[in-house]
Amino acid sequence: MGYPKLAVGCAFALAALAGGCAGPLVVSAAQSRGNDVKFGYTRVGSGEQGIISCSVPEGGGDLSNCRHMKLNFKE
């Protein structure tokens, strides 16, 4: 499967695009299952953490339907 290389490449692209004024994202994990790819990230400076979930079309291609899924840790 080409997903691990795709996941790493997309993780870097997402981090570069989401950097802006709020601080860059550091991707700490990537996982794929079927046509879904998820990236775990931490925002530099604020420590905000979350997951970006995207879909990959059958046969490969660009990621689509990406959305942020914020995490709330509770003790």
Image: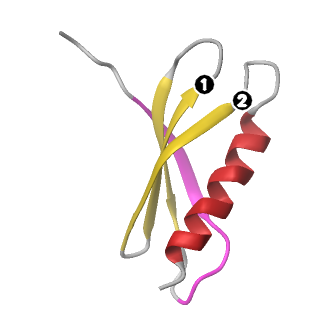
Residue under numbered circle 1: 43
Residue under numbered circle 2: 24
Residue at 46 percent across and 32 percent down: it is 50
51 w.r.t. 10: above or below: above
Image location (x, y in percent) of residue 63: 62, 65
Residue at 65 percent across and 79 percent down: it is 61
State which tag comes first along the sequence, 1 or 2: 2
Image location (x, y in percent) of residue 58: 51, 86
The amino acid at mark 2 is Pro
Q: Which residues are magenta?
A: 59-70
Please tell me whether residue 69 belongs to the stretch shown in magenta.
yes
Kindly indicate whether the residue at mark 2 contacts the one at mark 1 (C-beta within 8 angstroms): yes
Residue at 46 percent across and 62 percent down: it is 37
Rendered image: mark on residue 16: none
Image position of 71 (left or right of 19): left
Residue at 51 percent across and 19 percent down: it is 48
